[in-house]
Amino acid sequence: MRDLAADGMCRGLREDSARPALPAEIKPLSRHCSFLETDVTDPEACVALVDRAVDTFGGLDIAFNNAGITGSSAKVAQYPHDVWAKVLSVNLTGVFNAMRAELPVMEGQGGGVVVNTASVIGLRGTAGGSAYAASKHGVIGLTRSAALEYGGKGIRINALCPGYVETRLVTGPTAGIPAHVTERKVRRTALKRLGTPEEIASFVVWIADPRASFLTGTEITVDGGFLTS
């Protein structure tokens, strides 16, 4: 978030204990900052978030759809229905809800850039994480389809596929991935470490930059060499 603010981009969702301090943290890095806690599973809340962005900034040039949860670790036949529904609701339908709110604004103003967070798991799958894998495969498919629909309107839409990154979903007491699994994934990664949020943010900035103006409808993998193993 700090890197995005420094480059003039802010997003309106963060779901953790640090969120009360977030506006104060990024305000020094950006001339304009607006924070709105948003439930991406609620279509009306997504519209309200986009409306806030338009009211604050005068338009919507860039949208970074980055909300996500991991879900349970279980085989398909034992996967809880309620957890499956929750993961798909946040990770896939949440992106859909956000794009439904964002794209009409961008179309009306003659263009824009959308970056959707997918995952390397959306490219290969993972045992025990069927809901997460399905949701991220879905984000890639949604991204490709929307890019075809809106490319002629001057809107670029891409999916970012991070590998294992040092966030609360991967490390720490509330991690959705067991520590021994994370350690095994790090050993499989060519760089032998987790990525950092700052490294992922730098790619969002690059995708949104006008110098990437011929990039759309694709997925960009940022995984430290995880998929090469």
Image (tube, rainbow, N blue to C red):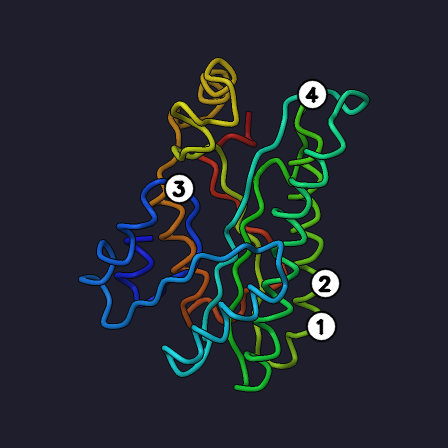
Q: The disc labelled 1 sits on which kind of residue? A: Glu
Q: The disc labelled 3 sits on which kind of residue? A: Asp
**Side (left or right) of 187 relative to 3:** right
Please tell me which residue is depicted at 76% across the width and 32% down the height of the picture: 81
| Residue placed under numbered mark 4 in the picture | 74
Please tell me which residue is depicted at 21% across the width and 62% down the height of the picture: 29
Q: Nearer the viewer, residue 12 or 145?
A: 12
- For the residues labelled 2 and 1, say whether their Cβ atoms are less than 8 Å apart: yes
Vertical position of residue 36 compared to residue 168: above or below: below
Q: The disc labelled 2 sits on which kind of residue? A: Ser
Percent x, y for residue 38? 49, 57
Going from the N terminus, do you reach mark 4 or mark 3 first?
3
Going from the N terminus, do you reach mark 1 or mark 3 first?
3
Q: The disc labelled 4 sits on which kind of residue? A: Ala
Residue 67: image tag: none
Q: Secondary structure at mark 4?
A: loop
Q: CA gap, disc 4 to disc 1?
A: 36 Å
Q: Secondary structure at mark 3?
A: loop
Q: CA gap, disc 2 to disc 3?
A: 32 Å
Local crowd size for mark 2, using a 10 Å CA cut-off: few (<14), some (14–19), many (≥20): few
Query: Which of the 4 image quadrants contains residue 68?
Result: top right
Percent x, y for residue 30? 24, 67
Percent x, y for residue 96? 66, 60
Going from the N terminus, do you reach mark 4 or mark 1 first?
4
**Side (left or right) of 111 relative to 171:** right
- The nearer-to-camera label among 2 and 3 is 3
Q: Secondary structure at mark 1?
A: helix
